[in-house]
Amino acid sequence: MNVALGLVAFYCVTPGVLSKAMLFKPAKAMSNFSIIFCLFIASLLQKNFIEKDKAIPYKIFMLFWCVSEFSLYWDETVLLLFPATLIIFPGLFKRTTYWVWWCLLPLVYDLLCCLDRQQGMPSARSFYRLIKIYSSECRAFNF
C-alpha cells in the first residue's frame, strides 16, 4: 500500500504532470484528477476486499471500470491508468472476468472514438451506432 501511495505522489510531482496542469488546459487538469481518483478507488478496493481475502462484488468492480472508462475521454494522458493499475494493484484482477473487462478498457475507448471518426469524446451518436451494430449481430445469430 505504501508503495502505491509513493508512486502516485511521485507521479503527481513530476514536471510533466505539473507543466500540463499549471497551464490553463482544463482537460489536462481533469485527466490528472481522474488518474489519481481511479488509483484511489483501486486502492480502496484492494484495502477493503483483497487484503481481507474477500471477493470484490461484480457491481462494485463494474462501477470502478465505468469510472475508469469515462475518465479516458478527458485526455489521452489517462491511458496511463491502464498499465499503472495493472502494475500497482495486480490483486484486483485475480478473477478472469475482471482481467477481461480491464483488457477491454482501451478497446472500448478506441471503438467509440473510431465510430465517431474524430478525436476525443464520442458523441451520443457513437453509442447509438454501437448498440445498432450489436443488435444486428445478435439477430444474425438468433440471440
Image: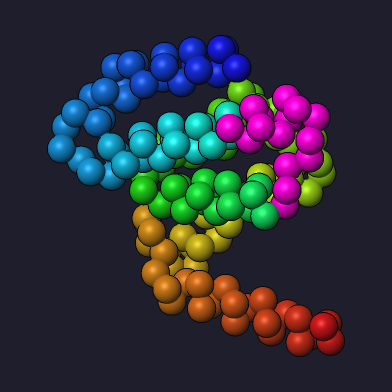
Q: Residue at x 73, y 80 (%)?
A: 137
Q: Can you see residue 86?
A: no
Q: How many marks?
A: 0
Q: Quadrant of residue 77?
A: top left
Q: Is residue 96 left or right of residue 18?
A: right
* Residue 22 location (% of width, % of height): 19, 28
Q: Quadrant of residue 18?
A: top left
Q: Residue at x 33, y 16 (%)?
A: 13
Within the magenta stretch, is there residue 45?
A: yes
* Residue 98 location (% of width, % of height): 73, 45
Q: Nearer the viewer, residue 41 or 31?
A: 41
Q: Nearer the viewer, residue 51 or 68?
A: 51
* Residue 54 location (% of width, % of height): 79, 35
Within the magenta stretch, is there residue 38?
A: no
The span shown in magenta is: 44-58
Q: Please identify the residue farthest to the left as the structure is shown.
A: 24
Vertical relation: 118 (above or below) 141:
above
Q: Can you see residue 24?
A: yes
Q: Is residue 46 left or right of residue 141?
A: left
Vertical relation: 117 (above or below) 67:
below
Locate the C terminus by quadrant.
bottom right
Vertical relation: 137 (above or below) 7:
below
Locate the N terminus by quadrant.
top right
